[in-house]
């Protein structure tokens, strides 16, 4: 049976008050876990950011966005491990909907073609009653 790979994005925020080496260890731990279980991994570290509201008495967090492709069972395990860690403040893992974006331009072109055909079909029918009224 063929493996089904889906695209996901994981966004997690680590406590920013950690020393630099501990912060790097936490980020590396989870990015290496993703690298071991997924393909097409892309890590984007947003760095230290001020939070909109305090989370566990922390006003700042170090945010990391990771895009990857994996089997559907892996994101649940990743989220479980991220939530267990007391150094991670927030976790958000979402599935990318790549097919919907790719289908949209074709649907727009098809709708435009249908509208043009409908407009062309209505034009002679609209002129015919006007000609009979003039007589």
Image (cartoon, rainbow, N blue to C red):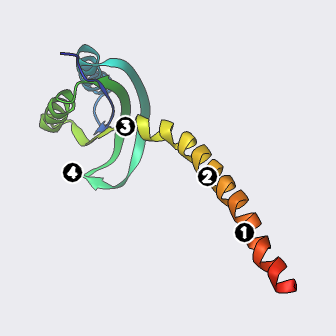
Q: In this rendering, which labeled residue sits more in front, label 2 or label 1?
A: 1
The location of residue 117, given as percent across then percent down, is 67, 53
Determine the residue positioned at 19% across, 27% down: 74
Above or below residue 67? Residue 114 is below
Q: CA distance from mark 2 to mark 3?
A: 30 Å
Residue under pointer 3:
96
Q: Which mark is residue 29?
A: none
Label 2 with label 1: CB-CB less than 8 Å: no
Determine the residue positioned at 21% across, 51% down: 56
Residue under pointer 4:
56
Q: Residues within 10 Å of mark 1 (few under 14, many from 20)?
A: few
Q: Residues within 10 Å of mark 2 (few under 14, many from 20)?
A: few
Q: Based on the displayed image, in which of its 4 quarters is residue 7 positioned?
A: top left
124 or 34: which is nearer to us? 124
Residue under pointer 1:
125
Q: Based on the displayed image, in which of its 4 quarters is residue 19 positioned?
A: top left
Report helix, strand or loop for mark 3.
Answer: loop
Mark toward the start of the polypeptide (4 vs 2): 4
Report helix, strand or loop for mark 4.
Answer: loop
Residue ranking furthest to the right: 135
Q: CA distance from mark 2 to mark 1?
A: 17 Å
Mark toward the start of the polypeptide (2 vs 1): 2
Label 1 with label 4: CB-CB less than 8 Å: no
Q: Which quarter of the figure is the N terminus placed in?
A: top left
């Amino acid at each position: 049976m063929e493996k089904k790979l889906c695209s996901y994005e994981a966004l997690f925020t680590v406590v920013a008050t950690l020393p630099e080496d501990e912060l790097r260890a936490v980020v590396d731990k989870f990015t290496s876990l993703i690298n071991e279980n997924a393909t097409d991994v892309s890590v984007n570290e947003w760095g230290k950011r001020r939070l909109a509201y305090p989370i566990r008495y922390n006003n700042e967090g170090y945010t990391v966005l990771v895009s990857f492709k994996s089997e559907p069972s892996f994101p649940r395990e990743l989220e479980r491990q991220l939530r267990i860690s007391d150094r991670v403040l927030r976790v958000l893992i979402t599935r990318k909907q790549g097919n919907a974006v790719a289908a949209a331009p074709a649907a727009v072109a098809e709708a435009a073609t249908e509208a043009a055909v409908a407009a062309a079909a209505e034009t002679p029918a609209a002129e015919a009653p006007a000609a009979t009224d003039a007589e």
